[in-house]
Amino acid sequence: MKPKTIIVAVLLAIVAIVLFNNKEESSFWFFGDIRTSKLLIIGVFFLIGVITGGIIFRRKKAHPKEYGVTNPHTHVSPTPLEDHPYSPSNLSDEDREYIRKD
């Protein structure tokens, strides 16, 4: 079994033990005085907490590894290597010598 499954099972067992040890009747105010079992009150608030935590801490969609431009109306023509400012033909002799040392 995976560790995550074991941890969830242990937590659910603890929640069940806590819930079933609180069976006595209790008074709860929610737009009036409601007399009900603590088991019901604790269980409802536990479920509300689980749902809220699931919404708040849900995983976001992963960002794409590569972003692309999808505009069909623009056409970018590749520049020739000779016209590029950093092409080898535009370098000075000093720059070529420095590159050769690497």
Image: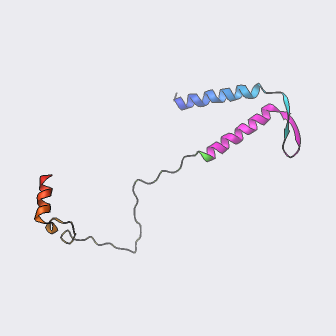
Q: Residue at x 58, y 46 (%)?
A: 58
Q: Position of residue 44 (x, y in %)?
A: 75, 38
Q: Residue at x 64, y 43 (%)?
A: 53
Which residue of the protein is positioned furthest toward the front in this rendering? 94
Q: Position of residue 57 (x, y in %)?
A: 59, 45
Q: Residue 51: say if magenta.
A: yes
Asked if 96 appears above or below 48 in the picture, the reply is below
Q: Is residue 61 left or right of residue 37?
A: left
Q: Is residue 82 left or right of residue 55?
A: left
Q: Which residues are magenta?
A: 30-55
Residue nearest the observer in this picture, 21 or 73: 21
Q: Position of residue 50 (x, y in %)?
A: 66, 40
Q: Residue at x 39, y 56 (%)?
A: 66
Colouring mode (rainbow / by chain / secondary structure / one colour)? rainbow
Q: Of helix, strand and loop, which mostly describes the magenta segment?
A: helix
Q: Position of residue 47 (x, y in %)?
A: 70, 39
Quadrant for residue 87, please give it. Answer: bottom left
Q: Residue 81: say if magenta.
A: no
Q: Residue at x 63, y 29 (%)?
A: 11
Quadrant for residue 67, please give it. Answer: bottom left
Query: How many circles with numbers are drawn on the protein?
Result: 0
Residue nearest the observer in this picture, 28 or 7: 28
Quadrant for residue 82, please give it. Answer: bottom left
